[in-house]
Amino acid sequence: MPDIAIDAVPSARPAVAGPLARQRRRAGLAFVAPVFLFLCAVIVLPLGHAFWTSLHRVRGLSSTFVGLQNYARVLGDEPFWHSLRISLVFTGSAVALHMLLGLGLALVLHRLTFARTTLRILFLTPWMVAPAVGATIWLWLLEPQFGVVNYLLQLAGAASAPVAWLGEPRSALAAVIAVDVWRGVPFVMLLLLAGLQTIPPEQYEAAEIDGANRWQQFRYVTWPNLHYLMIVASTLDIINVIRHYDIIGVMTGGGPAGGTEVLPALLYNTAFRANRFGEAAAIGVLLLFIVLAFAIVYVRLTRLDRPENAT
Amino acid sequence: MRRPHRLRALIGAVLSLLAGAVVAQQPIVLQWQTANLTETQYEPVWKKTIAEFEAANPGIRIEPVLVARKDHWTKFVAAAQARRAPCIVSVDLTTAAYNGYLLPLDKYYNAEPAEFRKAWSDKMLSAAKWERKLYGLPIWGGTYGEIYNRDLVVKAGLDPNKPPKTFDEYIAWGRKLTGKDQWATAVLGGKTDTTTRVLLTWIWANGGEAFNADMTEATFAKNAKSLQAIKTYLSLAKDGLAAPSPTTTNYLEQTNLFAQGKIATMRNAYWAVAKVVGDNPAMNGKMFAAPIPANVPNAPTLSTMTASSISHSCPHPDAAWKFIKFDADKKWAIQRAKVANWMPLRNDLADEPEIKADPMLAQFVQMGNNARSYPLPSPVWADIAANDIVDAVQKSLLAPDKTDAIFRELDGKLTKKLRDI
């Protein structure tokens, strides 16, 4: 079937023309159509509906067209900008820590010669736990009166009185970031470990012969090889983390005093607690644009067909 | 007709008959969602209610929907928006009716005999109305009082027979009831509307008002007595008389702390007594209740009224009304009061021997005679009670010296919302 292989290469396309090519294109479209329609049903239509809702003032089961009023209202309100700031702090801190700890763990696991599989499974456990379940466990661990964390801190003499981890905006934000890191690091670790395993050992051998120490091996062999993967992983992680709601929803609901109210939490609270669906949809559309910006970065990065271009 | 055709026709007829019979035997399934179903102490009562109703009405099956209190409203709204809300629901009535989520019940209620209708006072029924239409039948009531741990009170050298009557006396008690790893009370600042309920009791006990008469203006800071009450209440946390982490304390943490002997008093409804005993059976008989300390004579307490309503999208409203009527019966009202500690809301229950025989219940009934109905009648109440007011309380707990400014800002925000309906 050499012609199929040629079809897949854009530069070879002119070689196939005429009725046969048209027939193949039609067949191809027919095969793609079900998936396209399915994606339209589950992605495009809800998005369209969300945008349509954002142009309405919704009060329960009735709605009135208000144009862009909801956007003006949302963008003119302090809570949106406050939530955007919280979202950026949450996402920035969580992604940075995911990358740092993920890389550290991946390097350790890559070098290990014993218990590697056991440790890999062990490190992956937080990622395998459903976010809501993990968040509930941490909620109890951090409970001020009966929580294990405070008990251990007091036992070790590190705290004289119970700490209300989720009772104060800064510590609550730190706590939800910590839980997100606990849950998010394994995935990054797995990605980077896969990347590490693709680095040819000869490169390390050559560096060693040239007298490179551990740090120099990392700086001049590991890092250039992982650089592209790190950028892709962090972009994907940003897209993922900026949309996070579950951990915050369970642990703080956005509180106290809005201290952990990231944009998805603001969206949820506006829709389901305040019953302002139009404004919530507007927040959703704005959040979508933020995510899209990062998605464009990701698409551009992955379009570079040679990783070395990115390094 | 040839033989195979006849055979097919015969099979078709038999299948149609069978299908018809299956459809005819399918019972009507009514989903029932109320946050109260998740209260352990109520479980035996609602299970018995369902069993007896289904036995009396073989064509109707009740399917309880258990949702945690904090998620109850959001789940209902999501389902109502999808036109798939459970048939029988207990939600913030005014907000739900305003949003079109509920069915007016006047048609059903007016068709009932006078004897049934007179079981509820006009005042009680007015709390279940929105724009003069009845949207629910009052089922659950909760009168707020101050509940004390007798052992801790005695241990602190205080007399259980002379509970504090004013704010100052309450604070003086609080100081004596606070010790190492133990506090006088809990200040509620968690993200549920119970935070707002307790705050309102303090405001009313000081002769203040949180809103003007027609609910078009908020007066938390504008009314000097309200602001003074708020400051007194929240200062319990600042002064160390209340359990730590008030911004995450809601009614569940409060009752847990009380059941474990970590706090000596709690402001709560009568049903909290059953909850405490459920959490710690050793507390049975070790509690006493008293009217809320107040700085003005005849200060009202707060009485919650939760009604059973029929959702707008319910395909079987007649059957749903049948169940609501069954559940509102005197027999179940007594069970709710005796077993699960909800206040009897029917007129004909106050003199029931079973109600009178329980001294604490009788005391709460007495306190309920001077109570204001809750939730307050505003279509945005569910939002402002669980979000805006709670946010202000949390901010104030975190920055007590900014309380004036925080509640002034709250007044402005709420007034805008109340007028933007």
Image: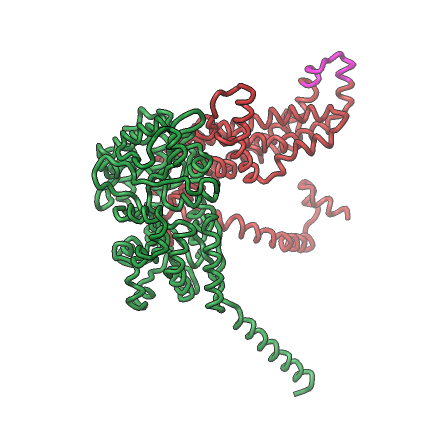
Chain colours: A red, B green
The stretch in magenta equals A206-218
Q: Is residue A214 placed above or below B95 in the rendered structure?
A: above
Q: Main secondary structure of the magenta part?
A: helix
Given the current orientation, which residue lies at the most extreme top position? Answer: A211
- As rendered, which of B160 and B218 lies closer to the eye? B160
- Give residue A178's position: percent from left, percent from top: 54, 28
Residue drawn at point x = 33 percent, y = 50 percent: B305
- B13 left or right of B367 in image: right
- As rendered, which of B369 and B9 lies closer to the eye? B369
Residue drawn at point x = 29 percent, y = 47 percent: B368
- Give residue A190's position: percent from left, percent from top: 66, 32
- Give residue B403's position: percent from left, percent from top: 30, 28
Q: Quadrant of residue B184?
A: top left
Residue A65 visible in the displayed image:
no
Instruction: Tell whether position A216 is magenta.
Output: yes
- As rendered, which of B351 and B415 lies closer to the eye? B351
Q: Quadrant of residue A14?
A: top right
- Give residue B88's position: percent from left, percent from top: 42, 58
Given the current orientation, which residue lies at the most extreme bottom position? Answer: B1
Residue drawn at point x = 34 percent, y = 39 percent: B146
Instruction: Tell whether position B194 is magenta.
Output: no
Residue A150 visible in the displayed image:
yes
Residue drawn at point x = 42 percent, y = 60 percent: B313
- A304 left or right of B23 in image: right
